[in-house]
Amino acid sequence: MNLLIMGPAGAGKGTFSEKLIENYDIRHISTGDMLRDQVSRKTELGLIAADYMNHGRLVPSEIVNKMVEVTLGGDECANGYLLDGYPRTIDQAKELEEITERIGRKIDAVLVLEVGIEILEQRITGRRICPKCGAIYHIKWKPTKVEGICDNCGAEVIQRKDDTLEELKVRMDEYYKNTEPVIGFYEERGLVHRIDASGSTEEIFKNIQEILKSIV
Ligand code: AMP
């Protein structure tokens, strides 16, 4: 099963990706996580990407496309993949279509998470992540058991540099301008499933599972 998960920052892409890979044997590919890894290791690519990312702007597509192509073609995606945070522009969507056709791993469904802006603001500004294992917390709704320390691996949790109201505004502008047209691109191909992602995690995930039953 080959899936895309889409939605603005704070819609729950990371949370539902975690649940999807727990429940289905598919590989999670988050371009944001891959880029953050490059930034924290201070690789050549990471040094270029950091400036864009810290200001909520999109990293140049050549960099991201290459990373995705290498990963999608690997053995770890033979059973399926879940792309999260990619494609974010029409050009990336076209590039992905070429890649998936070439390697014979076409997309089966596009899950689009929909949430109002007030909820997104609360989720984003309260979000904390573990830089070591990627676990996601929220200071109010899903706090760590010991303040500031990841429940899974004991590392110190952090606030992403772009998880501020100011950066959220830039990311939302990017989303409306560049990423919403991508949903239209997949709608034309009959692949889009829209999900109301403002309720409880359990409720939303149940809806996602119902959708997936119809495509596998
Ligand atoms: P995310 O974790 O998906 O919210 O991504 C965090 C940041 O990484 C974004 O704000 C962009 O700067 C960068 N990024 C992630 N995926 C892409 C992509 N497909 N194209 C360009 N930039 C990306």
Image: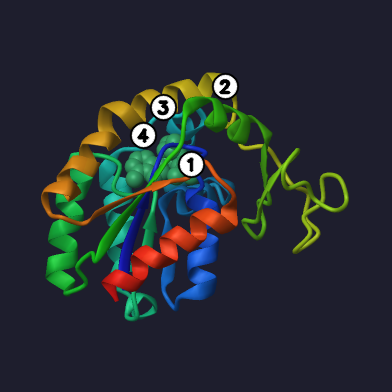
Q: Amino acid at mark 3?
A: Met
Q: How is the image coloured?
A: rainbow
Residue 165's label in the rendered image is 2
Q: Is mark 3 within 8 Å of ligand 1?
A: no
**Residue under pointer 4:** 58
Nearest the eye: 38 or 199: 199
Whether residues under marks 3 and 1 lie with C-beta atoms below 8 angstroms apart, the answer is no
Which of discs 3 and 4 lies nearer the camera? The answer is 3
Q: CA distance from mark 2 to mark 3?
A: 10 Å
> Is residue 129 shown left or right of residue 75?
right
Q: Earlier in the sequence, mark 3 or mark 1?
A: 1
Cα separation between marks 1 and 2: 15 Å
**Is there CB contact under 8 Å for labels 2 and 3?**
no
Q: Are marks 4 and 2 in contact (CB under 8 Å)?
A: no
Give the labeled residue for mark 1: 11
Q: Which of marks 2 and 1 precedes in the sequence?
A: 1
Q: CA distance from mark 4 to mark 1?
A: 18 Å
**Most foreground residue, 66 or 86:** 86
Give residue 163's quadrant in the image.
Answer: top right
Q: Residue at x 13, y 67 (%)?
A: 101
Q: Which residue is mark 3?
A: 172
State which mark lies toward you, 4 or 2.
Answer: 2
Q: Residues within 10 Å of mark 2 (few under 14, many from 20)?
A: some
What's the distance in space between the residues labelled 3 and 4, CA to CA? Answer: 11 Å
Q: Is residue 162 visible?
A: no
Q: CA distance from mark 4 to mark 2?
A: 17 Å
